[in-house]
Amino acid sequence: MIRIRWPAALATLFVILLGWYLLYTQQVVDALETNAQTLAEIFGQVQNGYTTVDPRAQSTALFNLYGMVIETGIPIVLTAPVTLDPARDTVLEAVNLPFEVDLRTPQGQEQVLEYVERLDLRHDPVGDPLTQHLHFGDPDLVGELRRNRWLQVAGLLLVGIVGFAVVRAQRRTESEKAWTAMARELAHQLGTPISSLQGWLEVLRIHPAQRPGSVGDTEISVAIEEDVVRLGRISRRFELIGREPKLEAVDLHVVVGELERYLRARLPKLGPGVEFTVDVPSELPRVEANAVLLTWAFENLVKNSLDALAGRGGWIALQARREGRWVNLRVEDSGSGVAPEIRDRIFAAGVTTKSGGWGVGLALARRIVEGLHGGRIELLDGPEGGATFQVRLPVAS
């Protein structure tokens, strides 16, 4: 089955239409230039015939004028009235007709007079109605322009309709991909505390004297409480990500401090050999944010850096500074950086360099920072080939 790449197909169609339009426009320009030259030559012949007294020169000028009129391609029919009824006019001369005709026959006369009726619908005849009528039509160029404008409109509409359908389909696909990735992420985050709770329930079924490590009920209850709190935090995060959260003045020093304590307790398992430094001054102005979601976004950025270090060790630095009416927070790492082929798509759902990863963390971070906080998140060139993610948040008013 042949798979159509719609963006490339649309771009090709657009280039074809553009090329055709430019070529046709050039043909129109050339025709107008030719008409201008013909009019100038006609004026010159009129001047020659008007100023000369030589009958032969006048005849020559008239003959040249006749030839020039024929070369314009304008259909012209000269008729003379036989009676007061225009339908009974006699065709004296006809040039540039779209068909071949013999004016010496009644059939030829009738055919041209029918054609004259069509010409008169668009242009009124000129001349003295008591002596002769001069009927004329449009040159071929005008007819082509009249027809081609609808072709141009149809082409643009086609590109627009197909483009709209493709963009809509792509957005639907991206949305479905995002929700699928979100569901997987939710299942992944819920899986750990749920598995832990199941383990503790198994321990509770064992007689206290037979439990491994002489684990007491107090220790089990504390561990269960931690898992329940974690489940509540996960539930709260996913509840807020689906709607507009309430924003308030948030102290970044406090938010990052809580995140630092949470991560340092887990670094031995998450990132052995990783040096994690935080530099967020306490005098920074508050930002307009939701603390729960903002913590989640920062956590995803740090976890992305941990994944980039791939268990081989290195360093991660988190720092924040004020810049005008913004507070800039950067997460830098000494990892391998981001591959050039995915830099432009790094924040799209489903884009990941991890085997088995779902590419949700950075997409969620962008949704939180840009979609819910009116901020900006971007990937910068990191030091020594690493990656640097910068988050810009507006200062609370």
Image: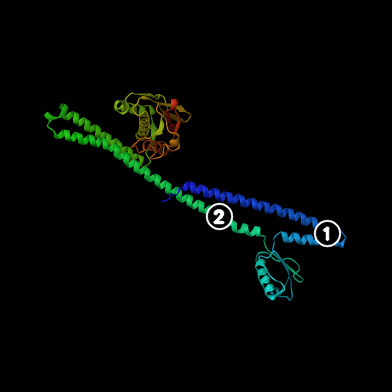
**Amino acid type indicated by mark 2:** Val
Res 108 label? none
Q: Measuring from the top left, give residue 259's x and y in whole percent.
A: 34, 29
**Residue 143, quarter of picture:** bottom right
Mark 1 vs mark 2, foreground winner is 1
**Amino acid type indicated by mark 1:** Gly
Q: Secondary structure at mark 1?
A: helix
Quick check: can you spot residue 258? yes
Q: Nearer the viewer, residue 272 or 263?
A: 272
**Residue 388, quarter of picture:** top left
Q: Measuring from the top left, give residue 161's x and y in whole percent.
A: 49, 52
Q: On the rendered structure, is 138 left or right of 188?
A: right
Q: On the rendered structure, is 17 left or right of 255?
A: right
Q: Measuring from the top left, give residue 317's x and y in whole percent.
A: 39, 25
Where 170 falls versus 219 (above or below)? below
Name the residue at 85% across, 60% down: 57
Name the residue at 59% across, 57% down: 148
Name the residue at 76% across, 61% down: 67
The residue beneath circle 1 is: 49
Disc 1: CA contacts within 10 A as few (<14), some (14-19) or many (>=20): many
Q: Quadrant of the C terminus?
A: top left
Name the residue at 47% across, 50% down: 164
Where 42 falls versus 251 (above or below)? below
Q: Secondary structure at mark 2?
A: helix
Res 153 label? 2
Q: Nearer the viewer, residue 65 or 347?
A: 65
